[in-house]
C-alpha cells in the first residue's frame, strides 16, 4: 500500500512539473514572438523615414 501511494505521488509531481514546463515554454515563445514583431515594426518605421 505504501509503495503505490509513493508511486502516485511521484506521478502527480511529475505531471505538475511537465505542465509547468510546457506553460513556461509557451510563455517564453509568445514573449519572443512579441519582441520580434516589435523589432520588425521599429525597423519598418525607421526604414520608411
Image (cartoon, rainbow, N blue to C red):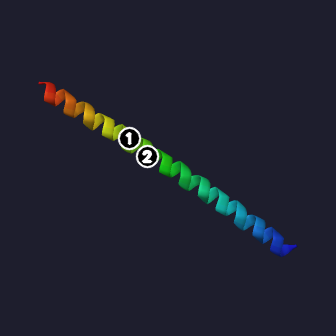
Circle 1 residue: 33
Q: Position of residue 15 (x, y in %)?
A: 66, 58
The residues bearing labels 1 and 2 have C-alpha atoms spaced at a distance of: 6 Å
Q: Residues within 10 Å of mark 1 (few under 14, many from 20)?
A: few
Residue toward you, 21 or 48 = 48
In which quadrant of the rendered view does residue 7 lie? bottom right
Q: Secondary structure at mark 1?
A: helix
Q: Quick one: quadrant of the N terminus?
A: bottom right
Q: Residue at x 11, y 24 (%)?
A: 49
Q: Residues within 10 Å of mark 2 (few under 14, many from 20)?
A: few
Q: Residue at x 26, y 31 (%)?
A: 41
Q: Residue at x 43, y 46 (%)?
A: 29
Q: Position of residue 6 (x, y in %)?
A: 77, 71
Compared to 12, does 24 lie above or below?
Answer: above
- Determine whether label 1 and label 2 are within 8 Å by CB: yes
Q: Residue furthest left?
A: 49
Q: Secondary structure at mark 2?
A: helix
Compared to 1, does 41 lie above or below?
Answer: above
In which quadrant of the rendered view does residue 3 lie? bottom right
Q: Residue at x 74, y 65 (%)?
A: 9
Q: Is residue 7 left or right of residue 49?
A: right
Q: Is residue 3 left or right of residue 39?
A: right
Q: Residue furthest bottom?
A: 3
Q: Residue furthest top?
A: 49
Circle 2 residue: 29
Compared to 3, does 38 lie above or below?
Answer: above
Amino acid at each position: 500500500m505504501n509503495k503505490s501511494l509513493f508511486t502516485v505521488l511521484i506521478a502527480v509531481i511529475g505531471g505538475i512539473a511537465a505542465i509547468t514546463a510546457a506553460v513556461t515554454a509557451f510563455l517564453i515563445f509568445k514573449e519572443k514572438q512579441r519582441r520580434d514583431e516589435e523589432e520588425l515594426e521599429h525597423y519598418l518605421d525607421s526604414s520608411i523615414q
